Amino acid sequence: MNGNLLAAKIHQLLVKEYGHPTWRPHLSPVGELVSTILSQNTNDINRDLAYNSLRLTYPTWEEVRDAPEHQLIECIKTAGLANQKGPAIQNALKVITEERGKIELEFLKSMTSKDASSWLTDLKGVGPKTAAIVLLFSLGMAAFPVDTHVHRVTGRIGIRPEKMTASKAHTYLAEKFSPDTYYAVHLNLIRLGREICKARQPLCQNCPLNGICDYYNNGTKQ
């Protein structure tokens, strides 16, 4: 089965199992950017605690941008790596201000997905996953985010080369899946990775994809 047919089958089976998912309420593009920076190397609960703390302490993005760095770091400490995330957030807001005259990212919709992703990843601390999340979930643009779960599951299934890095997988997988399935596939793969295709001791017998999965059918499951 070629890559595009396999991608279509993955989407079909996951929708049959999980339905068409709906993500948490979408934030503004800038809010999504900040939230996703905070989400790096932490869980959703700690990300949300830090984001809510940030928004309560600094009601406007201008206040976040101009806050004393040490105070901002203290405000978002529940997200972990605050010494890195705080400066990354402020740098992003400063660059946006310098280039746009105000803090907004809606202008990205006038670009191609590739150019918009490149603009975002030029920001220090913003990688392809963060850029893709902003584009897909806040701006409704064609982008395929690859997080830890998506990377693991797609490697096991065999739809991407096993040793391909997550950063390269964004473009590779985007070419395999149809753009109109990105939203559902991304969220359903995450759910599959959390509930069944776990990093350790995956529950292969319960997996809706075991009929098309290399990991399962090659007898490599543990």
Image (tube, rainbow, N blue to C red):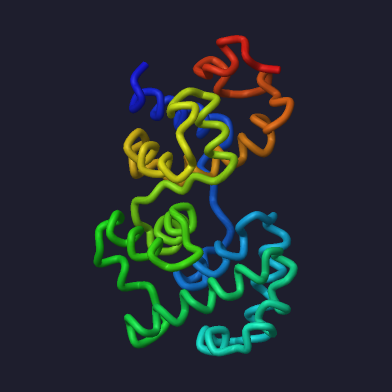
Vertical comparison of 133 with 60: above or below: above
Q: How many marks?
A: 0
Q: What percent of the width, then of the height, locates residue 12?
A: 45, 29
The residue depicted at 50 percent of the width and 31 percent of the height is 154
Nearer the observer, 178 or 129: 129
Vertical comparison of 209 with 39: above or below: above
The residue depicted at 49 percent of the width and 77 percent of the height is 91
Image quarter in which the N terminus is found: top left
Vertical comparison of 104 with 190: above or below: below
Nearer the observer, 110 or 156: 156
Q: What percent of the width, then of the height, locates residue 194?
A: 67, 39
The residue depicted at 62 percent of the width and 10 percent of the height is 219
Which image quadrant for residue 177? top left
Q: What percent of the width, then of the height, locates residue 205?
A: 68, 17
Q: What percent of the width, then of the height, locates residue 132?
A: 43, 54
The residue depicted at 72 percent of the width and 68 percent of the height is 49
Report whether 46 appears left or right of 210. right
Image quarter in which the C terminus is found: top right
Report whether 101 appears left or right of 134. left
Report whether 155 appears left or right of 44. left
Which image quadrant for residue 8? top left
